[in-house]
Image: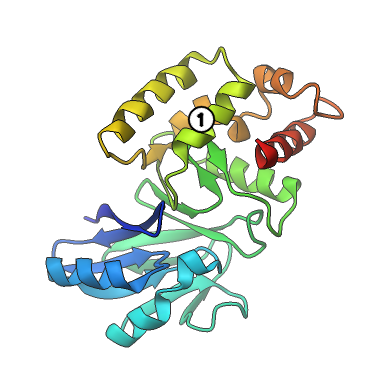
């Protein structure tokens, strides 16, 4: 059975550490090798594999050093030329097994065109596609691509735990409240997150059921979200609503 914990990096990144009962482990999106090596050394862990969601440096910057420190570690990532260190290239719906856990790949274009997410045992490692209360910027993909990707996440079981790569929750929720000020679950969550963060606790993981209740980017089909962007959207379609949301968030 895998247990998941975070290795903080940079200002607000989370490198996810997945370990089993025999002191073997996997890390997700290691942008910095130093905190990973220190954590593995302190815990006496052997690194079996590295999982990469996308090519941005704060997610892959530590891969070469980790490969040098753990030369037998496999590197899983998108099947494009951007990832020279990848030993196991992946595309949509591929599956693989590590430490008795089967992972399924979702291709989730939007933040980048070749972004992938990993789903296993009710856990979603989604990089910079979905955040608690928000979603990633569209550096390469279109609003339609990102909406399609987030819809795939919405279709996962409600109890799926969402392990995103950044602690952006409080700022995301301020925007969400600007869209849906009367969303009771959202307002309750704002108070919960404020309490956690005041104690130095992480707001991640979230869950799919929570995000469907409070995240405007998963709620573009809801009348209250359409109402919230009515002065910024060309029409009331889900795509135009989502496009208006993302455009507004970029300048919020």
User: Does residue 78 appear in the picture of this structure?
Assistant: yes
Quarter that holds the N terminus:
bottom left
The answer to which image quadrant residue 17 occupies is bottom left
Residue lying at 71% horizontally and 35% vertically, measured from the top left: 248
Query: Split into 4 quadrants, where in the image is the C terminus?
Result: top right
At which x and y percent is residue 186?
A: 48, 21
Name the residue furthest right: 234
Give the total of numbered labels. 1
Which residue is at a point 54% across and 31% down the rendered structure image? 215
Residue 237 is left or right of residue 107, and the answer is right
Q: In this picture, is 7 found above or below 62?
A: above
Rendered view: 62 above or below 232: below
Q: Is residue 113 left or right of residue 101?
A: right
The colouring scheme, among rainbow, by chain, secondary structure or one colour, is rainbow
Does residue 157 appear in this view? Answer: no
Out of 192 and 95, give the one closest to the viewer.
Answer: 192
Decide if residue 170 is on the left or right side of residue 71.
right
What residue lies at 75% left-to-right and 34% top-to-bottom?
Answer: 244
Residue in the image at 41% along x and 60% along y: 103
Would residue 135 appear left or right of 58 to someone viewing this image? right
The image shows residue 189 at horizontal and vertical percentages of 41, 24
Q: Check disc 1: other Cα within 10 Å, few if <14, some if 14-19, many if 20+.
A: many
Measured along the vertical axis of the image, is residue 171 above or below residue 143? above
Mark 1, residue position:
173
């Amino acid at each position: 059975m895998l247990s998941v914990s975070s290795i903080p990096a940079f200002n607000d990144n989370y490198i996810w550490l997945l370990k089993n009962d025999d002191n073997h482990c996997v890390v997700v999106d290691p942008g910095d090798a130093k905190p990973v090596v220190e954590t593995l050394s302190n815990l006496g862990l052997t690194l079996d594999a590295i999982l990469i969601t996308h090519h941005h440096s704060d997610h892959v910057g530590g891969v070469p050093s980790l490969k040098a420190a753990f030369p037998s570690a496999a590197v899983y990532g998108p099947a494009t030329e951007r990832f020279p260190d990848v030993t196991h290239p992946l595309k949509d719906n591929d599956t693989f097994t590590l430490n008795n856990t089967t992972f399924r790949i979702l291709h989730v274009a939007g933040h980048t065109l070749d972004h992938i997410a990993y789903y296993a045992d009710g856990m979603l490692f989604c990089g910079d596609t979905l955040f608690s209360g928000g979603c990633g910027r569209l550096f390469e993909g279109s609003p339609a691509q990102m909406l399609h990707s987030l819809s795939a996440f919405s279709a996962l079981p409600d109890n799926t735990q969402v392990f995103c790569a950044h602690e952006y929750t409080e700022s995301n929720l301020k925007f969400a409240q600007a869209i849906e000020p009367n969303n009771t679950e959202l307002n309750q969550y704002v108070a919960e997150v404020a309490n956690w963060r005041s104690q130095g606790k992480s707001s991640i993981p979230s869950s799919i059921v929570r995000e469907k209740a409070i995240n405007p980017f998963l709620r573009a089909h809801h009348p209250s979200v359409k109402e919230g962007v009515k002065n910024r959207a060309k029409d009331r379609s889900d795509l135009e609503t989502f496009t208006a949301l993302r455009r507004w968030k970029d300048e919020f």
